[in-house]
Image (cartoon, grey):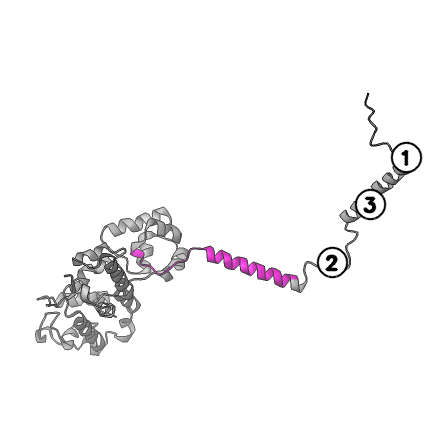
Amino acid sequence: MINFTSHFWYHKSQKNGIFLLAILIICLQAFIFLDVFSSEEKIAKKTPEVLAFQHQIDSLKMIAIENRKPKIFPFNPNYITDFKGEQLGMSLEEIDRLLAFRKTGKFINSKNDFQKVTKISDSLLAKIAPFFKFPDWVEKQNSHQKENSFSEKFTYQNYKKTAKSDLSTNDLNKATATDLQYISGIGEKIAERIIQYRSKLQGFTFKEQLYEVWGLQKEIADKTLETFIIKQKPIIKTVNINSLSFKELLRIPYMNYELCRKIFDYKDEVAEIQQISELKNIKDFPLDIYNRLVLYLHAE
């Protein structure tokens, strides 16, 4: 029969030693738990150094949060998609109102027009309107729309106009500065601007182009078109879009840097534009100026 000797059999002195060791361990754990060994050099949580370090950490956290937010770049609000509208904070109803308006073939030309169509709040408009990017001619017309309200009042001298019977022509493309000043509200400066813009376009092809003249109010343009008409459209010599350099294309009326870049990117993809109507295939191409732009371009 195998004799198993107990491993827990100790002498009385050994038992007392084990008992004292257990008491010592318990005391040490109690001291640690009660932070008995903490000294007077304990770091205060609100010292200037700690606060400065915590402020730096908070600043880095805020920078990281801002960097994760989607960045907004300048854009034409006429071409907002569902995804873009959601990123901007627009509701589905507001986006649908914009899309329905665009389907009618009309365009938004100011931030006020955008709010009227979409009915977005003033706070959201103030947030996203600084990023609106309209065609150059629209921005010029908007920024200088009120110029005449102060500089050209209907004074006595303004009413001393040329008699209608003394007009040299009623053709808008041949009218002189004196002829144009027959219209109340058109002074020397505005008349010269109309002629300069007409020269830049090589003549007015559409009567609506008159509204693009910098500083000419819509009401005055309406009056002008009641007297002056486009009897004969100008003969404009078009240029081959495939043979133009970037700078040459940029000089074309209605062209801006962003659109010019998109056209050259498209040309790199297709090697050569076969038909000028291919411009409509370019993503976010401003269709509102297509009929004007093709007056100066052709493809071959």
| Distance from Cα at disc 3 to Cα at disc 2 | 22 Å
Residue 11, numbered circle: 1
Of residue 231 and residue 35, the one placed in the foreground of this image is 35
Question: Label 3, on which residue?
Answer: 27
**Identity of the residue drawn at 40% across and 59% down:** 126
Q: Quadrant of residue 55?
A: bottom right
- Viewer-side label of 1, 2: 1
The answer to whether residue 76 is magenta is yes
In the rendered structure, which disc, 3 or 2, sits on the residue that comes first in sequence? 3
Magenta stretch in the rendered image: 50-78
Q: Quadrant of residue 44?
A: bottom right
Up/down of 201 relative to 100, above or below: below
In the rendered structure, which disc, 1 or 3, sits on the residue that comes first in sequence? 1
| Distance from Cα at disc 1 to Cα at disc 3 | 25 Å
**Identity of the residue drawn at 64% across and 61% down:** 51
In the rendered structure, which disc, 1 or 2, sits on the residue that comes first in sequence? 1
Q: Residue furthest top?
A: 1
**Identity of the residue drawn at 9% across and 76% down:** 166
Residue 22 left/right relative to 136: right
Residue 42, numbered circle: 2
Of residue 205 and residue 60, the one placed in the foreground of this image is 60
- Residue 288 image offset from top left, x and y in percent: 22, 58
